[in-house]
Structure formats: structure tokens, C-alpha cells
């Protein structure tokens, strides 16, 4: 089975590491990389490809919605699943993210089960052996 590659982006190092650990523990066929800013995500994407991108809406240097628009404008990323995370409970913000192309939305703080459930639903789309 080929390993799936996931990019985890959040400006809080401890949360990035927690998400990385949780995903790798529950999904041994997933390899993760991390990024700390929107610009850092862009740099990583220019040098590598990912099967899933999980990122924070309120990122330094490039906010989540601007990043989302940038991601969806690239042909190679139009179908890459994206999960946006945010501590805000603004329903309009969630609606906007989905309209811009986010596949799912996680409200912080979230329980590990919510994270795993969202990732599992996306991993099921991949039929790799």
C-alpha cells in the first residue's frame, strides 16, 4: 500500500505536533509533514504533492481564505482534499470556506475523535493498495 501524504499547518507548534501524532497513530499508512504559516504551505506545495491538507484559518503571512483561493486556482490542487481549522464559530466564515472549496471544517478546540473522523472520511476516498 502506498502511503498517503498529509500536510498539517498551524501556527501553534504544540497543536501541529499533536495532530501529527494523532494522525500517524491512527493511520499507519499516512506520512505527515508540517508547516507553520500560509507562506510555508505555499513553499511546501511548490516542492511536493499532498493527498490531504489540514490547515488553520488564522495563519500568519497568508490567511486561510486567501490560501484556500490560491490552492483551488492551481490545477494540481483542485481536487486535493482540504480541511480548514478555526477557533471561530462564525457560521458565515464556515459557509465561506466551504464555498471557496474546503472539504471539511474543524472547530477548535476539537476532540481527537472529530479529527480522526474527518480524516477517515477523506482517506476512504483513496483506494490504494
Image: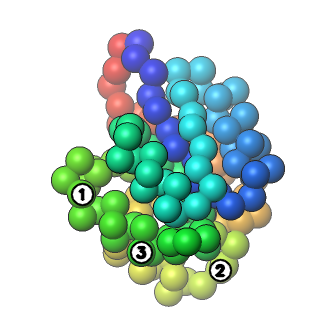
Q: Residues within 10 Å of mark 3 (few under 14, many from 20)?
A: few
- Of pointers 3 and 2, the one earlier in the residue sequence: 3
Q: Which residue is mark 3?
A: 66
Q: Report how far apart the C-alphas of labels 2 and 1 lie in the structure.
A: 29 Å
Write the residue at 74% across / 42% down: 17
Marks 2 & 1, CB-CB < 8 Å contact: no
Q: Is residue 123 visible?
A: yes
**Of callouts 1 and 3, the N-terminal one:** 3
Element carrying mark 2: loop
> Residue 20: percent from the left, percent from the top?
67, 38
State whether residue 114 is above or below residue 119. Answer: below
The residue wearing badge 1 is 74
Would residue 69 appear left or right of 114 to someone viewing this image? left
Residue at position x 42%, y 75% in the image: 66
- Can you identify the residue that label 2 sits on? 89
Name the image quarter holding residue 116: top right
Mark 1, secondary structure of its residue: loop
Would residue 113 be visible to someone looking at this image? no
Front residue of 53 and 112: 53
Amino acid at each position: 500500500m502506498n502511503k498517503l501524504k498529509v500536510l498539517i499547518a498551524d501556527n501553534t507548534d504544540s497543536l501541529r505536533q499533536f495532530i501529527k501524532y494523532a494522525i500517524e497513530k491512527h493511520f499507519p499508512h499516512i506520512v505527515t509533514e508540517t508547516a507553520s504559516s500560509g507562506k510555508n504551505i505555499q513553499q511546501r506545495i511548490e516542492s511536493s504533492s499532498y493527498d490531504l491538507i489540514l490547515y488553520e484559518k488564522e495563519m500568519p503571512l497568508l490567511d486561510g481564505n486567501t490560501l484556500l483561493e490560491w490552492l483551488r486556482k492551481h490545477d494540481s490542487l483542485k481536487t486535493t482534499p482540504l480541511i480548514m481549522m478555526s477557533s471561530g464559530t462564525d457560521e458565515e466564515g464556515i459557509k465561506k470556506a466551504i464555498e471557496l472549496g474546503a472539504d471539511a471544517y474543524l472547530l477548535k478546540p476539537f476532540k481527537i475523535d472529530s479529527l480522526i473522523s474527518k480524516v477517515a472520511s477523506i482517506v476512504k476516498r483513496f483506494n490504494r493498495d
